[in-house]
Every structure is written in structure tokens, then in C-alpha cells.
DNA sequence: AGGGTCATTAGATAAAAGCTATCAATCAGT
DNA sequence: ACTGATTGATAGCTTTTATCTAATGACCCT
């Protein structure tokens, strides 16, 4: 049984005439005749009673087959319709992931811009470690991720979006409040609060400030395994120590703000590059582009946006 | 879009693997690959995301297409099922017609026999004149008819079933009650009650008894336009006159029976041949055969059944 | 009997659906 | 980093199927 045969059945049922039905299907009359006969043989049932004269009538079986065929074509049209809808990249949910040190600072600004560009694209958001996000991306459990490490996987494409300098956060009463900028070496003897391992930002800070590694066993730094940048910021505000933050983290205003001071690093300041990554095979390029556009549209004043072509 | 393509989509959606899906469909992997690609191009949508590795995932669009396709195949199976049912000639209603002078005498016996042979074949019965029945038969509004005139239409097949002698019905107090048989010529001076024109039985009686024609203007016969054999029988019982009946009409017992007497014609007795007729193109030969068998099985004692071959 | 109207059959051709063999990409082990 | 295994895509060829034109056959009507 083929859809073509069913189409022919419908035409004959409608026209009650092989010749006219053939015309309506844009095929020759023998074509249609043979096709109907083939279907009748396959089903083992006569669908139409051909009376020699001008009389052609539908058997009860033919009637029911035609009815069922009509329903089939409704569903076929349904498939075409939903395919036409799905054709639009910006239709249907996008599963977007971001690491813990990006999500809280970027997403609040990103979402409205993205919604403006793609109102029919609901977002399913997930925060996690780079490693987990990458795995989920490859498995298809996420469609796109925002990460800071350059992604080196042949099945993944990544686009750098912006370069974000790091800054030093100190309690408001800290002597550094008077300094214009801090050199990374100066952090060595500070009481540094660091994120737990697994956070790529921790590794980036340690890499950017080799001074910290030297004192790693000395013990002035404190690794806070189950914490977040926000919690650490509050700890700094309470005077527990000092920390390094990505600059976007300083833009979120809280009641602790007056107890904190941010100071830039001395040039060249350490920084991270935030990238948007997706599977090479992900079939919605315009959805990715919308995310990129939305991020470029955000007013993350402190960062250096990377326009395509550059880099 | 073809049903084959949709079948492949379902297989890939189920197996999540082109190779296994191809195996499940008994085709080679390239065949399936190409077919899926073709459908994707036609719909303009990617249905499956092929990640280089062992990972194949369905896009939301693919998911919905597969779902819809499953519904389509339910309907396709539905067509096959209903065709399998309809395959049986003895399934589904049979539109059976009979003339006024046969129906009341044959059908009561016929129906149980037919129901025994074809319990799944409901009967839609119609009584009418031969002319109307024949027209409806040709138009497909009836599937088979029981008539007494030999049907001479190229698109209609007819099978003689039985030969039914005519008998004379007289009031119980009629002098003929003492006679063994009546010659048709003797009817000339009787007060004959006849059916209205349009009833073929009227014509047959007039043809069988030329004596009646001779006195047609003389006026001893009375034509009862809007009457039936049964009414005429009651009139005879009430003494209004005499009539001729087909012998099967004498088998229906009513309260008038004691007021009536039936006498055969002198040999050779006039008679009619009752035939079963159907469109040459009617596609349920076994349904026709069942009707024939059922009629042969009836115990119409007074008739001469015609077995096939004889005629 | 002849003409008209359909449906069916036959033979040829072109489109498609299929197969085998091969390729390219990726992944897992060594 | 090489190697082999796995997986889907591609290429080239063959077979099948769908379709056409033209002829044939069946049937009804005048």
C-alpha cells in the first residue's frame, strides 16, 4: 500500500469516474486504473464496482477505505505542517547550559535580549561544571553551553564571545582600597578565598596568579569546596579575606556592596574568554546565532566583546 | 513523502541507530540513509542529529514526525483490518428487493435460512414493482432482487430459482369447490379480482388466461389499483369474487382460510418463474450464492425448484 | 449493427528505490 | 599518536516500479 494509491482511491471515490479522477491526479487513466487494481489485489477486496456503462459505484469496503484514507492524509498534512513550523530554528525549546561563574551574572541580562530575538524559543537552563556541561552537550542533553575554557573536542564548535578581566575584591576597610591597581604577585600573602576544584574559574585564577601556587601549601588561601562566587563575595564583605572575581560578578548589586571594594589588576590584567559552544551537528544554526546576538547586545560594560572575524 | 520513508523514520527513532534500523526494515543501511535524507529535504527539517560517535539523537521535530507517523500506520493497519473483514462476501449488509407478490410469501421462510448461512449479513429489504426494483438494482441501490419476469438487461445476471404454478381461489361456498381442477377458459365468466397494472403478476395472469382478455371490456373482472394479493384473498373470502394466486400465496394461513378454497388449473397449469437477479458487476458472488441456497432450502412445497444446469 | 464511453492490457521509458563497495569521521585501545 | 572498529554518507550500478502512449476489450445506447 502506498500513499499514492490511497490518493487515487480518494480521487475515484470523489469523482466516481476513473477518467476524471485520473485527470484530477494529473496522471493518465490507465495509470490510475492499474494502481487501483493493484491495491484491490493487495487488500483482497473490490473497492469500486465498475458497471460497463456510466455507472461506477463504491462498495461498502471502498467507502470505508476511502474514509480511512482521508484520515491518513489529514495526518500526512499534519506532518507537513509541523515540519514547516519546526523549520524555524527559533521555534522550540533550546537547552542552554552555563558554568556556575557565568550563569548568575550573564543570564539575567541575556534572557530578555534573547526573548526579544526569539520569542518562540523557551529556554531550559542548567548551571554546572564545564566538564558536566560538555558531556551533556555531547550527549544531546544540552544544545548550547556558555563556558570559559577553550573547548577542544572535534565534535564541538565554539565561538569566543567576550574577554572578561579579573578583578580583586577586598573588604571596604582593606588598605588596598587606596591603590589604583593590584599586581598579581601581591596576592601571595593575602588571605585568599577560592572556589572548590571543579570550578574552572579556580584554575584560571591560580594560573593567572602563580604567586598563589607558591604559597599553596603555606596555607593563607582557603578553598571553599561547596560554595559559590556569591557566597565568597559575602565572606569578603564580612572581612574574612580577599578574592578574585570575574568583572561581571561586580555588576550584581547586593546589600553587601558598601562593605566591598573592587580593584583592577595591573596591566596586563588576567582574564578569561567566555565562549558559546554547541555540537557541530546541532541543526539550528540560527538559534545559536540568536544567542550570540543576544549576548553581544548585553551591556556588560567591563568586558571586551569579541566580534566575529576578530580573534 | 511515502509510507516507506515514514516506516524508516519510525525504525530509526526506535533503534536510534541507522544500521540496526536498516536491518529491522530488511534493507541496506545506505538505502535507509538516503531515504531519511530525502524526507528531511522534502520537509526541510532535520529529523535526526547524527553525531559522529555512537550518538544519534532525535530532534524535537523528528520526535513529532515519528509520533505522527505511528498514528498513520495505525490507520494503515486499520485499512488492512477492515479490508480483511470486507473480504468475506457474507459480511456486510445485502440490499435485497422482491416484488409485492413474492416478498410476503417467500421472505418469512427465506430469512431464517439465509441468516443461518450468513449470520454476519444483515438484510435491507425492499418491496416494489419489477420495474422499480430493476432500476434500483442497476443504480446500485439494491444488490439483488427477486422477480418473476425474465430480466433482459445486459448488465444484469439472473438465475431462475423455481417455477410456481398459479391456482384459482374461490369462496368456500363456490360450486367449483367440487371440481378437481379448473381450465383457464372457465374463468371468463367469473367475477375476477385482479391486481392493479404495474404488478407483473396481473400481466402474467391475463396472459395465462386469454379468456379474461376477451371479456376485458365486458367487465366481469375488477382491477383493484391500490391493493395487494392479501387484500384480494380476503375479498374472495368475503364472497366478492374469484381470483388467481401464485401457489405460494396459499401457504400463508390466516383466519379467512375456512372461507376459501384453492383449486389447481387443469394441466398444463399456468405458472411463473421466480428468478434471483443481480448486477453482472456485483462483487459478492458468495452472497448471491447464499441467497440461492437459502431459497432452495425453503420448503415451498407447491413449487418446482430449478437446480442449476436445469432451466 | 455501429458509435461512444470507459476500463483494461501491452510495451516502452523514465524515475525511484535498492544494493555493493567505498569513504570519511570518530572513538577506543594499545 | 597510530590502529582497528564502528557508524553514517556517498558513488556507481542494477532492479523495480510508476507512468506514458497506443491498442484492445467490454459494454451500453441509439
Image (cartoon, coloured by chain):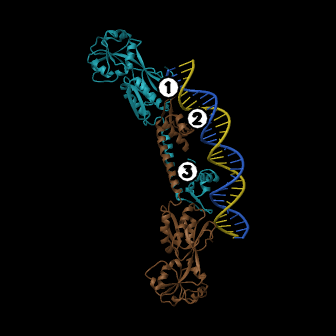
Chain colours: A brown, B cyan, C yellow, D blue
Res. B183 visible in picture: no
Q: Quadrant of the C terminus of chain A?
A: bottom right
Q: Which chain carries label 3?
A: B
Secondary structure beneath label 3: helix
Disc 1: which residue: B155
**In the image, residue A186 above or below residue B279:** below
Q: Position of residue A202 (x, y in %)?
A: 56, 80
**In the image, residue B140 above or below residue A219:** above
Q: Please report the residue visible at 56 percent of the width from the left and 88 percent of the height from the top.
A: A219
Quadrant of the rendered image containing residue A190: bottom right
Disc 2: which residue: A30
**In the image, residue A295 above or below residue A264:** above
Secondary structure beneath label 1: loop
Res. A191 visible in picture: yes
Q: Where is residue B25 in the image (x, y as percent from the top left)?
A: 59, 51
Front position in the image: B150 or A208:
A208
Disc 3: which residue: B6
Q: Mark 2 lies on which chain?
A: A
Give how far apart the Cα atoms at labels 2 and 1 are.
23 Å
Give how far apart the Cα atoms at labels 2 and 3 are.
28 Å
Amino acid at each position: 500500500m502506498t500513499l499514492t494509491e490511497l490518493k487515487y482511491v480518494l480521487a475515484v471515490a470523489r469523482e466516481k469516474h476513473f477518467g476524471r479522477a485520473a485527470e484530477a491526479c494529473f496522471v493518465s487513466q490507465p495509470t490510475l486504473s492499474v494502481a487501483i487494481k493493484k491495491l484491490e489485489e493487495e487488500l483482497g477486496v473490490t473497492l469500486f464496482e465498475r458497471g460497463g456503462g456510466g455507472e461506477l459505484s463504491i462498495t461498502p469496503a471502498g467507502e470505508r477505505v476511502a474514509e480511512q484514507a482521508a484520515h491518513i492524509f489529514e495526518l500526512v498534512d499534519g506532518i507537513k505542517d509541523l515540519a514547516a513550523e519546526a523549520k524555524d530554528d527559533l521555534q522550540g525549546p533550546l537547552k542552554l547550559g552555563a558554568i556556575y561563574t557565568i550563569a548568575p551574572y550573564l543570564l539575567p541580562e541575556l534572557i530578555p535580549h534573547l526573548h526579544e530575538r526569539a520569542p518562540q524559543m523557551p529556554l531550559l537552563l542548567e548551571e554546572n561544571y564545564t566538564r558536566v556541561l560538555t558531556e551533556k552537550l555531547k550527549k544531546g542533553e544540552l544544545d548550547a553551553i556558555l563556558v570559559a575554557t577553550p573547548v577542544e573536542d572535534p565534535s564541538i564548535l565554539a565561538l569566543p564571545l567576550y574577554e572578561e578581566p579579573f578583578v580583586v575584591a577586598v573588604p571596604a576597610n582593606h588598605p588596598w582600597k587606596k591603590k589604583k591597581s593590584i599586581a598579581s604577585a601581591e596576592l601571595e600573602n593575602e588571605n585568599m578565598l577560592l572556589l572548590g576544584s571543579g570550578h574552572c574559574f579556580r584554575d584560571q585564577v591560580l594560573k593567572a596568579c602563580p604567586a598563589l601556587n607558591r604559597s599553596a601549601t603555606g596555607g593563607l588561601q582557603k578553598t571553599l569546596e561547596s560554595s559559590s562566587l556569591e557566597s565568597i563575595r559575602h565572606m569578603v564583605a564580612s572581612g574574612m579575606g580577599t578574592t578574585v572575581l570575574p568583572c561581571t560578578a561586580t555588576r550584581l548589586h547586593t546589600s553587601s556592596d558598601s562593605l566591598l571594594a573592587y580593584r583592577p589588576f595591573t596591566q596586563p590584567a588576567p582574564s578569561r574568554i567566555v565562549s558559546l559552544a554547541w555540537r557541530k551537528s546541532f541543526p539550528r544554526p540560527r538559534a545559536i546565532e540568536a544567542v550570540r546576538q543576544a549576548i553581544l547586545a548585553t551591556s556588560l560594560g567591563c568586558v571586551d566583546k569579541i566580534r566575529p572575524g576578530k580573534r
